[in-house]
Image (cartoon, rainbow, N blue to C red):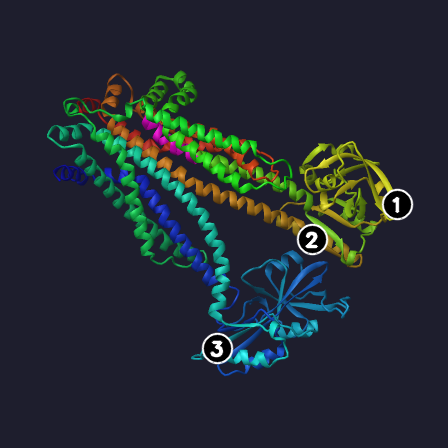
Amino acid sequence: MSVLRTQLRGVARRPSRLLLTGLAVLVVSFVVYATVLAQQITERSVLNGLSGTPEAAGVVVQNGTVTSAELAAVSKIPGVEEAVGRVENGTQVGGEYLALLGDPGTGPLAMATVSEGRYPSRPGEIAVTPRTVERMGIKPGSTVNAQIRYDEDGKPLAPSKLTVVGVVQVRDDYGFQAYAPTSALLKLGGYDFLNRIEMRLAPGADATTVIDQVGAVLAKSKIPSEERPQVQDGATVRHEEAEAAAEEVNTIFAVIAMFVAIAVVAAGLVATSTFRIVFAQRMRQLALLRAVGAGRGPIVRALAVEGALTGLATGLTGVLIALGAGHLLPVVAGWFGKNISSPGFPVPAALLTVLLAVFLTVVAVLAPAVSASRVSPLEALRGSGTTGARRDIGKLRWATGIVLVLGAVLTAAYIVTNLPGRDDEDYRAQPMLFALVASGALAFFALVTLGPVLVRPVLALIGWPLRRSSPVGRLAAGGVGAAPRRAAAVSVVVALGVTLIAGTLVGGASLRELADRELAASVPADYEMLGVDEARVPVALAEQLKQRDELTDVTPYRRMEVKLGATDGLAVTDLKMSALPELEKLDLTAGSLADLGPGKVVLSGFGAGNSGKKVGDQIQLSAGRRTVSLTVVAQFAGDAPLHASAVVDPADLTKLGAPATFSGVLANAKAAGETGRTNGNRAIQDAQVAAGGKWRVDVLADQRDQLNDNVTMLLIIAVGLVGLTVIIAVVGVGTTTALSVVERVRESGVLRAVGLSRSGLRTMLTTESALYGAIGAVVGLALGIPYAWLAVKALGLNAPFSMPYGQLAIVFLVLVAMTALAGVLPARRAAKVSPVAALGSE
């Protein structure tokens, strides 16, 4: 107890050292609890704002056949204040799809709010969303022809005229929505089927009673029992809808939890390193305790209690900071017109976070405490020593490190020998990915074990320019090399973060290139014009599109089904492969597209596999009684453009009986951005309407942008999450530098006494901090890039391996700069110490 009291008095005298020691734990406590609060905010926002059912709906009828007769009947049930039927239908307007949605437009059950003009009141009137105005060009006051009615055989009847009378704001604006009262849409379409009924209950009405009465009304209808809809209270429906959305939220946060766990491990490593330095500074004090009779056990227990107090203080501080930030976020969001929910006060999660911080620091302090308790009492008669100067790691640690390296190498070799071939249908990626994670974990723990041994050769490599640059550079490199354990403890955490970031960037670049190749086959241009009911595109219309200033790369094509080899019904096209820039991204497994011409064919991966033909072979294409024999000159890795099985020369497609008119036209917008895309769309629409309006226009660029945005967002999220580890690593560098400044006061004094200036001392210590980051970044890149290659190949997606050299260089430079900045303040503090005071300190 006397030993414990002595240690606690020391902590009480220097509380700032306690917080500095546990700074990494404070950061990870903030991250852990902030993640919990973020999940609370997201889930509550989903429950409050992402349900598709109005808050005022007390009872909902859905998932079955409902008619206007049932709507009229349920509206008369006692306790029902208002009943609204909803319907959703689609129509073609100028070749583009327009969704017609039923909504009252006013009242508590309305989902659409008028922002311009008025809400429709008669059949034939619609209100559109702002993005629909922009993308489809149908503005208030305009009239459009819409194909809504069809006969019993599905043939279109005369188009209906729709007049746009207003613009409405809705929760989700996709750019192709129009709203009108449900009754008006039913008359317009000539049908009597509703998607659902929503009922607003009178104050005091019992939802259960109303549900029973609605069920009785539906039971009297002529609808077969198996087709009768489901009746539920509105709260249940909203909860189910929100749960469906929240399930995706939970999946995302499960992935986030994995990265947070990695950050916790990184914080533990930094805390262990920090305790080693702190105990090294107090080696003389601990030796005095040993000299007056304190045993190793009491010293270990006292230091463990100190670690627990560190965890308690930093854990509480991190939780309180996260709680403040979580409750401030809705306020700040409100200033920008965003409505997000408060996270509340999840007390159990806060307690668990604090306990995690205490557990983390206790575990982190044990090894340094045991090492410190072995100090000899004779150390009390000498100057303060440091355990950080030890350069050996011991035979047991050597053996453990070698075993871990062998395990990582053998596991990686197993993955390499079992990588799939191209289009290997029997390949299972999951076991390989588990093996990859195991190999990566073994490699990381081998790095932790052998880190002090690896520091010196890596430092010799990257420190060579410093040693030749100036005496200050030599001193900085020598300072890092003199304490390899300290350098390894911090650099390993930096290496972990860089490994994950490098793997994420390389994997993301590879998957993006794969996505670009697949998109080049399915969406090779911004627009595609196709005929409604397979109407052909006249040559004159294609020529008109080529003359439009808003368009570029206008490429008409023909497409027909043929017998390729022994298989009927395969599509071939004569699309000009050099006409569209996107087509240059397509991957070939053999041959060259430049060889395509009369008598030649390029096969898709499926076409080659199905026919058994390869480059140089002859293959026959047949359509009816016509047959051509062609030479295979190239093979795509996947699909041919437009999901065809082969690409041929136009002359050969004509020989097979293809008409002179076109199957479709591809084109790109002349100008970039949303305005250029809208103008290009309008140019095609105007031309096809003037030619008879028999064609539809698909904006393929929207599909490409959506996929690119998804890939970009996933990459940003992944890098952001991995950045947690980097932040903790930078905190570790700053803490290590700050504590080593105190540890090396006499060394700093000697350097100042022999002529090193204050600026030189600041530069030396800042350079040391930068070297911690440089060592970690080099090791991280050396691990991250090979494992990223292995991950890309193990996925079995036939993805190319892409190296984002620029991004990796930026990561390296940013890490070095961040770790250098982390050492600036400690370096300034060291430079302010007088040489006389430094030489007199012990």
Viewer-nearest residue: 245 or 739: 245
Tell me if mark 1 has few (under 14), some (14-19) or many (20+) residues whose alpha carbon lies within 10 angstroms of its own: few
Q: Is residue 676 above or below residue 104?
A: above
Q: Secondary structure at mark 2?
A: strand
Mark 2 sits on what residue? Answer: 698
Mark 1 sits on what residue? Answer: 626
- Going by the numbered disc 1, the residue's amino acid type is Arg
Magenta stretch secondary structure, dominant = helix
Q: CA distance from mark 2 to mark 1?
A: 33 Å
**In magenta segment, residue 106:** no
727 left or right of 706 in image: left
Q: Upstream in the sequence, badge 2 or badge 1?
A: 1
Q: Is residue 168 above or below residue 603?
A: below
Q: Which mark is residue 201?
A: 3
Q: Position of residue 34 (x, y in %)?
A: 37, 50
Q: Secondary structure at mark 3?
A: strand
- Going by the numbered disc 3, the residue's amino acid type is Leu
- Report the magenta residues as a range: 485-497
